[in-house]
Amino acid sequence: MNKRLFTLLSLLVIASMALTACGTAATQAPAATDAPAATDAPAATDAPAAAYECTDALGCVKIAPDEPLHMAFWGVLSGADSSLGEDSKRGVEIAIDDKGGKLLGHDILLTTEDALCTPEGGATAASKLATDTSIVALVGSTCSDETVGGIAAITQAGLTTISPSNTRPALTDPNRGPDYAGYLRTAHSDAFQGKAVAEFAYNFLGVRKAATIHDGSAYAQALQQVFSDNFKELGGEIVAQEAVAKDATDMKPVLTTIAAKQPEFIYYPVFVAVGGYITAQVRDVPGLEDVKLAGSDGIFSPDFLKASGPNVEGVYLSSPDFSAFTGDYAGFLKKHEAKYGGSTLSTFHAHAYDAANIIFAALEKVAVVEADGTVYVPRQALRDAIYATKDFPGITGNLSCSPSGDCGAPVIAVYQVVNADPASWNPADPTNPNPKKVWP
Amino acid sequence: MRTSFGERMLDLVVTGFLWGIRIAILLAIVIGTIVTVSKGHYTSEQWIGFVVFGVAQGAIYALIALGYTMVYGILRMINFAHGDIFMTGAFGAYFVATWLNTIGFVDRNPFLGLLIPVLFAMILAAAIAMLVERIAYRPLRNAPRLVPLISAIGASFFLEYAFRGFFGPGKYAYPPIKALDGGWTIFNVEIQKVQVLVVAAAAIMMAILYFIVMYTKVGKAMRAVSESQDTAALMGIDVNRIIVSTFALGAAMAGAAGVLFSLVYRQIDFFMGFTPGIKAFTAAVLGGIGNIPGAMVGGLVLGVFESIGPSLFLEGLGIPRPYQLKDVIAYTMLVMILLFRPSGILGERLSKKKA
């Protein structure tokens, strides 16, 4: 009897709590619309009684004294391109270590979400992260496709993300639309990279007939188009612009089609899987035995060497110019070696490190710290502070963010693979680098 | 049989619609082909090249398709983990071949250097398939048909992500065999040695399989079990043993296909079985699922169509970047065959009650 009474009572308590919760939510909602400044304030802030009053247009994140400061990394962490995301994630982790794992008196907590290098994966990861109201800011994504799929969810949640490795030009176009308000990047735009490769091919290699292959991804499609436009402008001829599916394995038919147009140079700015298949098969196709090959930062990784086999020797790869990094890149590499062992996995670790540090600097600028250690982070102010970044001393250069979200210092170099052994990968080695910088 | 006027009209409309699709697709192919050929972008050597690539790819599809078709023939279930059995074979061969390569054995004795990884891959794939059958399928033997299918998908994921856990998500390059470099020139057409090897090996493998199924005791028992499990059991056939050997035989073919695939495309990863698996399943349906010669024919037809299709008729129709649509050709063929000849090219040589 007693037990049943207890159950009944607890049910009543739960029901009343639920009702009260609904009630408060209902009364808060119209209050939010009354205030013109707070258009879509998330209910993250429920401490109006405290000394700090949140007036931010996007609301504030409240971090209680015993709570960690929550950041997130989203990008590709599985599948063939996982080295790209893993590499960037390591950059963020090293940046956190450099802060001693603490910022504003709180431990930094890093959540990661796999975005699979696809628009769908990006959308899923972003919507998942967007529902977590404890997140302050994000680093990511790694593939341009992920951003295309996920950025709307992140911007609408009042979050801001800095991508270390998205290079698709449209992402920081001045007319990119309101969904991209929460998006910046420390990576270069491919408007620079495609142009650099075109100049390298036309002026340095002296080729006049080029073909391109892309894999339908936002990144590859845009990059080969920028290359083609610039190559034509220089006076060259684009004899073929082909495309394959992202999961294609047999490249010989498409390469035979290209061989019929007799190019001197094939540019395939794709990712590791497709890049590996093309490189491994291209020499078997009659007419392409001596054609010059080039890829870009998507395959600037020892994984590409692993996937390609011995044919990879001599392939040109464009990438940010490591020797143009103004910051302490050597010091970063030492920390990387100590923490993970071996050399870096891909291209954009330094960009990720800079992205995390830009966020830290902005946080230190805008966060409000109470006497008891409670921290409030106004979201719009944080976003504005990140956009206002000027002459930030990063590893990749002195970074200033443009109003359309470009923070990178775009210095592109072209490297050449000189040794097919993936273990020899070390583009930053001063004496015996592989791949080796050949241009400019 | 009596049918109302309305029903007959509906029937007419549906038939007319299907004929319309047939004619439209046929027209598209013919027009595309005529335009491409009249433009003359490609030399006849290049056309033969397309066919050769297609035959090599198709032989691999055919080898994998055999496993689908044999298991379907005997159990009426689609073994969706089969593509991943193919992957395990490739991985097994990769490690053996790399080791043989580093000790220099392959250069000294190229024939054995090729054969040992193939045999190892076949044994490994068969062993894993037998385990999968024991753990994931046998307990569900009498469950409704959908249940083993779901279990198969689970087994497929398990194998993929187990291999990812062991060997990481990265790609591995299959070691090159020097003896297979280069090719022969026949009538002005250069044919890669490795492609000749793939086609020859696949043909030998299929001949052996055909011999086993048609002329040995185990093969006879397999055919009996596929006719009727209960009757076969009454005749003193150990049904479980026969089912296990069917799985093992099909998996051995897939394992060998994994090595041949790696020899041609020189790249392996934990997810490599997925697309070829689906394509091989398409090939099995194309040829007539449950029918062993059908799987071979289906594989070759699919491989050749995929290879020449984009440049033969898609390009002629003015479709830019036709190679992106390679998979569309494969799956359009699947839909067409399901619509117009559900029994497949060679028809299903099984008694009707199993369909």
Image (cartoon, grey):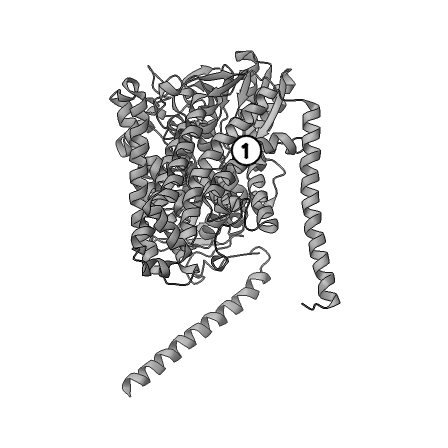
| Apparent side of residue B165 relative to residue B275 in the rendered image (left or right) | left
Quadrant housing residue B66: top left
Pick the residue in front: A123 or A139.
A123
Q: Which residue is mark 1?
A: B304
Residue drawn where x is 58% and y is 43% of the image: B333
Q: Is residue B291 above or below residue A237?
A: below
Residue type indicated by callout 1: Val
Estimate the x, y position of residue B185 in percent, counting from the top left. 50, 16
Q: Quadrant of the N terminus of chain A?
A: bottom left
Pick the residue in front: A157 or B302.
B302
| Apparent side of residue B352 relative to residue A50 in the rendered image (left or right) | right
Residue drawn where x is 49% and y is 72% of the image: A23
Q: Is residue B296 above or below residue A194?
A: below
Q: Is residue A287 visible?
A: no
Estimate the x, y position of residue B47 in percent, counting from the top left. 59, 24
- What residue occupies the far left of the structure in this picture? B103
Pick the residue in front: B178 or A167.
B178
Pick the residue in front: A75 or B165.
B165
